[in-house]
Image (tube, helix red, strand yellow):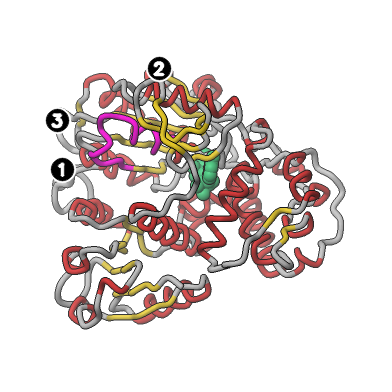
Amino acid sequence: MHSILIVEDESIIRTALKRLLERNSYRVTEAESVTEASQHDLNQFDLIISDLRLPGAPGTELITMAKQTPVLIMTSYASMRSAVDAMKLGAVDYIAKPFDHEDMIRTVRRVIEDTSKSTGFQGLDLTEGEDPAEIKVPQKDGIINVMGDLVGSCEPMQKFYRRILRVAPADITVLIQGESGTGKELAARAVHQHSPRKDAPLINVNCAAIPESLIESELFGHEKGSFTGATSARQGLVEAAEGGTLFLDEIGELPMEAQARLLRVIQESEVRRVGSVHSRKVNVRLVAATHRNLKQLVKENRFREDLYYRLQVIELALPPLRERGKDVLEIANYLIDKHARRLHIDSPIKLSKAAKDKMVAYDWPGNVRELENSIQRSLILADDGVIDVENLGINTDDWNIPDTLATPDAPITPEPKAAEPPTDAEKTDEEDLSLEDYFQHYVVEHQDEMSETDLAQKLGISRKCLWERRQRLGIPRPKKTAKG
Ligand SMILES: Nc1ncnc2c1ncn2[C@@H]1O[C@H](COP(=O)(O)OP(=O)(O)OP(=O)(O)O)[C@@H](O)[C@H]1O
């Protein structure tokens, strides 16, 4: 069982986080300050999660004290800048408070997995080979099975990997396109990792997750006094990516004003902070991603045409999972290994023949993200080390998307079919399902008169989480209400 030290002075947050981590099978130790934390042998932990602002020394002090153990810094959204500073000091990552439970668990898993990989764990048995661009990529019989965290060896993915290898070393803007959950973020990371900028920062920004009123100052920085609350000058995330790569996920959600500033970054390699008359030179490579049809957004005057043409210099299109043939099984086995390790399931787990057939035949509208959710669920429900069809939770007959949600922006979903009563396995998820029902109804009912920020606030979740759930549940933002 992995063990985690939480350093947080607010007892409500500390206790909530402890419960969350324990529910996810982590062993938790608590401390209220850096001094209290230092009474433990910090290297015995797999991860330290610390608030940035603590009574006494700041949480970043733990980075040098812990040496071997990664430190994940929690910070309030308003101090995102200091989160980036914490990363410069060596924090493994940061998470904004109030955090979304799914985000927190996903980050914790990733950090622990990445650390175990870098300390010798090899997930797949692959030999090293030379790729055409002379960059070392694991290959087997000339086939690339994995690139970074992207797994799969079908022909469309071979083309995709080779395109990354060709494009990554050239210092040009890249646009990654693909349906939600196809692995665009992993692809962006692979581009960075195979570029000469790999040792400089990769700054990852989800444009849909930052409130519209803050996005310009977050991305481009601001001068002191440029707006109410701008008490000091601040560098933006573009400048924080200096020498490295800026990954703008969901770029189709970027407001028009921010698009104009971004264009300047691409065209002139210059950034102008909000409230400043001066520009600063920046050396940043831009990688953008979207699941939207940007050309369509241009036609609807929601995306600048000049920016569109600047972005689509090189396009990388990730195929949907349903077009990757038997890769679904390759990825499923990788995910079974990954999550079985996390859940401390030591006995081998296999897919039954029927489960494999179903997985290959199924459409996977939510792509690899949906597959990952299905695998996690199956690992918990599987009997005698065998995952069978009913464990997968992909009964296609259950798809019943209300007509009111079908808009041109909706992600591709299977044809609506008559709903059937839930299976036993699904009944165990009843609480989650009813919460999702509530979420769906609330959003559909209120989205016309409420902004995304207000909706998220009322639902008690982050804007990023609201956006992610919209993707997952197939509730796109209606055009008339796309105001933030
Ligand atoms: N080929 C793959 N092999 C293994 N895991 C994958 C693969 N593709 C995606 N994943 C996993 O699936 C999940 C979704 O991937 P990711 O967030 O990169 O998708 P995305 O296309 O950026 O989605 P969105 O458009 O919703 O942001 C992640 O947990 C990622 O690790």
Mark 3: which amino acid?
Answer: Arg
In the rendered view, would you say 335 is above or below 104? above
**Does the residue at mark 1 contact the one at mark 2 (Cβ under 8 Å)?**
no
Mark 1 / mark 2, whichever is N-terminal: 1
Asked whether 447 falls inside the magenta stretch, the response is no
Can residue 307 be seen here? The reply is: no
**Neighbourhood count class around disc 3 (C-alpha, 10 Å): few under 14, some 14–19, many 20 upward:** few
Per the image, the residue denoted by label 1 is 223
Residue closest to the eye, 410 or 387: 387
C-alpha span from label 1 to label 3? 13 Å
Residue 3 position, x and y percent, is 39, 73
**Neighbourhood count class around disc 1 (C-alpha, 10 Å): few under 14, some 14–19, many 20 upward:** some
Residue 310 position, x and y percent, is 37, 18
The disc placed on residue 411 is none
C-alpha span from label 3 to label 2? 24 Å
Residue closest to the eye, 387 or 122: 122
Occupied quadrant, residue 286: top left
Residue 121 position, x and y percent, is 41, 54
Mark 3 / mark 2, whichever is N-terminal: 3
In the rendered view, would you say 361 is above or below 210? above
Per the image, the residue denoted by label 2 is 313
Callout in the foreground (1, 2): 2
Callout in the foreground (3, 2): 2
Q: Secondary structure at mark 1?
A: loop
Per the image, the residue denoted by label 3 is 280
Q: Secondary structure at mark 2?
A: loop
Callout in the foreground (1, 3): 3
Q: Secondary structure at mark 3?
A: strand
Ligand 1 is within 8 Å of the C-beta of the residue at disc 1: no
Magenta-colored span? 187-203
Q: Residue at x 27, y 80 (%)?
A: 32
Occupied quadrant, residue 215: top left
